[in-house]
Image (cartoon, rainbow, N blue to C red):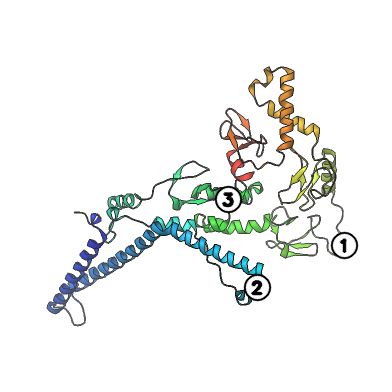
Amino acid sequence: MELSDLDPPTLRLVVQMHLDDINALTKTASQKGKGRAGEKPDSVIAFEEYQNNLLRTSQLLSDEVLSRSIARAVKEDADALRALQAEEQRAASDRELALRLSGVRDPSSSTTSRPETPALDEEALRKLEALWISPENAASTWHAESSTWASSRKQKVLGESKKDKMCVACNDLYYSFDIVSSKGCGHDYCRECIQSLFQSSIMDETLFPPRCCGNQLLLDTCRRLLPSALVGQFRAKKIELETPNRTYCHIPTCSTFIPPQAINGNVAACVRCGATTCAVCKKAAHANSDCPEDPSTQELIRLAEEEGWQRCYSCARFVELDRGCHHITCRCGAQFCYVCGERWKTCLCPQWEENRLLARANAIVDREARAAQLPDWQRANLVEQERQNQVINHVCRHDSWSSRQGRNRCDECHDTLTVFIYECRQCRILACRRCRFNRL
């Protein structure tokens, strides 16, 4: 019989019997040994080493019992614990509301506030449940593992937990402890895909912060599946990407981001090479003098005026309206009117431009292959329907999608793909898989 087929109580009994035998053998060998004074016979040394191995195995078995106990409790009592905690929180909220309505001050508020009981972490519960090994599938770990035995033990250990979590990015199945979930929409990401998303967010600002269906993927939630180096890079980049009107070292071979803490007045000192840069014109610093007109900046402003681009009041980026209404949300988060550049809802500018609405409606109608064969009056009706739809759904949450067959172009990243192109049922925007989940 294989030791791996024994149940844990039997294994512990076997180990204890071996320990008793080895203790007796060690005493006998010590009494009969004929070696040099102060030296132990080889047999005694061998017996003691075997005894130490058995003691370590006994400790491993005890730890295994504890892990199973924890996993069993989580498996059997998790729902009850959640319900009990929810009831306690409701009772505390009711008491606080009753005291506030009655005008009675809560005595506990005058002292140090009590820490709130932390909510049960679903990620932790899943990892604890993964420790569960049913007795009939338990495997012994007290002897050295051969590759064949280790492979069979892994299959038995994972027998209770199936690959039942699908990654929304790659559509592969994974164990729950190799998955991280978005708190808002509940979509799951595997280790490789969440690492790819965080890495892409560092390189592509349109993907920052990492999000799924508009819900931000928090670093603390995804931390256990991210390598330490990537976490450090993300935290450093986060400071840069969250800084409006950023300043970079004016030396082209350096171009290092200069954090606000390194800017004194209008002079920014590069933390890498030590060069100083003007925080206004972004050229070499000119101490003791006003910032001169920058020819390249003035040329860009002139071009923006000719093309009808608008400039963000917060980060000074130029924005070109491609579709939709005049409500602009900049990458930095600022919202403003595309016509006048003022903060949104502080002006009297029209919300739409009729020519842009008609152009967008015609583009949507032309997606259908049969549009070219339609009579003029029927096509005009479809264009008017889409024009009205654009007005109704100009602020869209993109809650419902349908897939489109054939070759299509993503309206966000402008990649042309033959598969994985989706169309929002409300506003009719086209988006690839990454833009649908992580960019919009």
Farthest residue in the bottom direction? 37
Name the secondary structure under disc 3: loop
**Amino acid type shown at disc 3:** Gly
Q: Which mark is residue 289?
A: 1
Crowding at mark 2 (Cα within 10 Å: few <14, some 14-19, many 20+): few
Sequence-wise first label, 3 or 1: 3
- Identify the residue shown where x is 30% and y is 68%: 59
User: Residue 96, image x and y in percent?
Assistant: 61, 67
**Amino acid type shown at disc 2:** Val
Q: Are marks 2 and 3 in contact (CB under 8 Å)?
A: no
Residue 184 lies left or right of residue 135; in this view the side is right
Q: 83 or 315, which is in the foreground?
A: 83
Quarter the N terminus occupies: bottom left
User: Residue 70, image x and y in percent?
Assistant: 38, 62
Sequence-wise first label, 2 or 1: 2
Query: Which marked residue is nearer to the observer: mark 3 or mark 1?
Result: 3
Farthest residue in the left direction? 32
User: Residue 203, image x and y in percent?
Assistant: 63, 49
Query: Which marked residue is nearer to the observer: mark 2 or mark 1?
Result: 2
Residue 399 lies left or right of residue 317; in this view the side is left
Residue 348 lies left or right of residue 373; in this view the side is right
**Amino acid type shown at disc 1:** Ser
Q: Which mark is residue 184?
A: 3
User: Residue 133, image x and y in percent?
Assistant: 33, 55
